[in-house]
Image (spheres, rainbow, N blue to C red):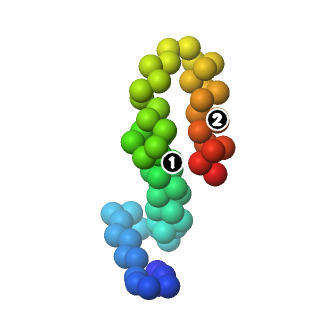
Amino acid sequence: MKSKDDYCVIVSSKSNLDSLEKYQQWWTIGNLFGVFKTLGFNFEDTHFKNPEKIYKLIVFISIAYL
């Protein structure tokens, strides 16, 4: 794949043609998890135990990230 400044090479052990699309999805999800943990929101520092509160916080952080 050619980007504006450089190339992006995707290597996969699978012989499918949608490896780039899967990598793009993974990259987006990986960035979101990074934001949840250490890149600003420090999600693990909340120490929430109530599943409903955890769900609401995840929704809120996701919206703020977007």
Q: Quadrant of residue 50?
A: top right
For marks 2 and 1 on the same chain, the one whose residue lies earlier in the sequence = 1
- Contact (Cβ within 8 Å) of mark 2 with mark 1: no
- Callout count: 2
Q: Amino acid at mark 1?
A: Leu
Query: Element at badge 1?
Result: helix
Residue extending farthest to the front is: 40
Q: Taking 33 as reference, is 21 above or below it?
A: below
Q: Amino acid at mark 2?
A: Val
Count neighbours of disc 1 (C-alpha within 10 A) and say few if under 14, some if 14 to 19, many if 20 or more.
some
Mark on residue 12?
none
Compared across the picture, whether 55 is left or right of 38 comes to right
Residue nearer the viewer, 3 or 20: 3
Residue extending farthest to the top is: 50
Residue in the picture at 44% in, 19% down: 47
Horizontal and vertical percent for residue 16? 46, 67
Compared across the picture, whether 15 is left or right of 25 comes to left
Q: Quadrant of residue 57?
A: top right
Q: CA distance from mark 2 to mark 1?
A: 12 Å
Residue in the picture at 44% in, 85% down: 5
Residue nearer the viewer, 33 or 14: 33
Residue in the picture at 46% in, 62% down: 23
Q: Taking 15 as reference, is 36 above or below it?
A: above
Q: Would residue 22 be seen by someone viewing this image from the given angle? A: no
Query: Element at badge 2?
Result: helix
Q: Would residue 20 be seen by someone viewing this image from the given angle? A: yes
- Mark 1 lies on residue: 32
Count neighbours of disc 2 (C-alpha within 10 A) and say few if under 14, some if 14 to 19, many if 20 or more.
few
Mark on residue 59?
2
Horizontal and vertical percent for residue 41? 49, 38
Residue in the picture at 42% in, 39% down: 37
